[in-house]
Amino acid sequence: MDFEYTEEQLLIQKTAREFAEEHLAPGVIERDEKKIYPAEQIKMLADLGFMGMMVPEEWGGAGLDTISYCIAMEEISNVDASAGVVMSVNNSLVCQLLNDFASDEQKEKYLKPLASGKWLGAFSLSEPQAGSDASNLLAFARRESDYYILNGTKNWVTNGINSNVVIVFALTEKDVGYRGISSFIVEKGFDGFSTGKPENKLGIRGSDTCEIYLDNCRVPVENRINEEGMGFKIALKTLDGGRIGIAGQALGIARAALEHSVDYAKERKQFGKTISSFGAIQQKIANMATDIDAARLLIHKSAYLKDQHKPYSAEAAMAKSFASKAAMDASTECVQIFGGYGYMQEYGVERLMRDAKITQIYEGTTEVQEIVVARSILEKR
Ligand SMILES: Cc1cc2nc3c(=O)[nH]c(=O)nc-3n(C[C@H](O)[C@H](O)[C@H](O)COP(=O)(O)OP(=O)(O)OC[C@H]3O[C@@H](n4cnc5c(N)ncnc54)[C@H](O)[C@@H]3O)c2cc1C
């Protein structure tokens, strides 16, 4: 077993860290407050090859492994978790899905521009009544000769407003449960497609989230991904990989909380001493550091298994539930270490707490991850 990064992985870490410091740190508080999408920075991430990291070069990607992707997610989210989620959705939920399930014609037309970052993608599974119970869809795709006619409302679509293409899940057959779900590549310009207003969110405010309305939306048959009825399997397999990326996002937030905490604790004096000399503060820092290391190990293990084409669903669920709790705990303790200053926006740590929360909710809540882990353990014995 080797705990060292390769030369290539070290280079990715350095590149991502320098990029984040130089181009994401400036203005991160303002983008959060005013809900400003980091358009220029996302273009730069595309130039670095960070928008289709795990896609082979022949399809426009960077041809890297999943550990490299996790390293980049950690570094980007360490400074700006909103940029992190934009990157994560395009990499894990859109490019990886097309790479695994699309036809060569679809890859040529859609994966190439998406993996190179020329275009941005979104993934639209959730509906108002279908969250954790994601197979409970109402959106319907009716076949009419060479087209499907899609109708329905999808909600909480990350990148919904800024993307060029959305992977939409809808029923092609009713009353057969998840076996009736199919997936489609929907271009923004297709007739009958529209988006709602940007949601006003607690955190990751620099990324956009919106509803999508399908009103007799005409989608050519050649834009159906794989066979009819395969949509739910495609979604679940894709979300397994997505969870590793979100765990990486959570890890970046947790590490930011630790770094801010250490810097502040060594500077802030009370009772004539730096607060870092108090046992209570040291204990918080020790717990944060331990959780962060443990989260990184779980993330890299699940990424390794994915790259080895071995089962990794339970490991990805463990990584996401653990890393997201680490992010929530570390960011809450960070605000505590900052005292009243932590509660003020200008110190930049209350944002970590707000950003951390979503990592326990999207791409499967913590409770859903626990179900995935428990099932795999119970089935094994
Ligand atoms: C900012 C944001 C961005 C998002 N981006 C996307 C996106 O890009 N694409 C997309 O398709 N979706 C997206 N989502 C949707 C997200 O994946 C769902 O919010 C999530 O899966 C949870 O669904 P829900 O919100 O309907 O909660 P519910 O499923 O209603 O859950 C409510 C509570 O009940 C718990 N619960 C539910 N079922 C069980 C169970 N069986 N056992 C125990 N507890 C249970 C949950 O864990 C949770 O605590 C996004 C959501 C947000 C908030």
Image (cartoon, rainbow, N blue to C red):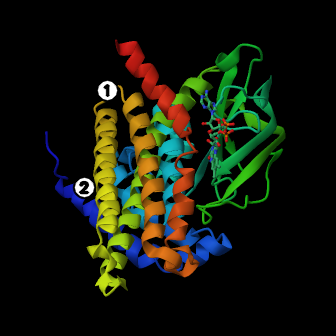
Q: Residue at x 44, y 38 (%)?
A: 241
- Is residue 217 visible to us here? yes
The quarter of the picture showing ligand 1? top right
Q: Nearer the viewer, residue 333 or 129?
A: 333
The residue that disc 1 covers is 310
What is the quadrant of the N terminus in the image? top left
Amino acid type at mark 2: Gln
- Cα distance in 3D space between marks 2 and 1: 21 Å
Between 69 and 379, the one lying in front of the other is 379
User: Does 243 sit left or right of 129 as displayed?
Assistant: left
Could you tell whether 155 is left or right of 8 in the image?
right
**In the image, residue 337 lies at what x, y percent?**
42, 71
* Residue on which the image places disc 2: 9
Determine the secondary structure under disc 2: helix
Decide which of tag 2 and tag 1 comes sooner along the chain: 2
How many numbered tags mark residues here?
A: 2
Q: Quadrant of residue 256?
A: bottom left
Q: Relative to residue 68, is residue 235 depicted above or below?
A: above
Q: Quadrant of the C terminus?
A: top left
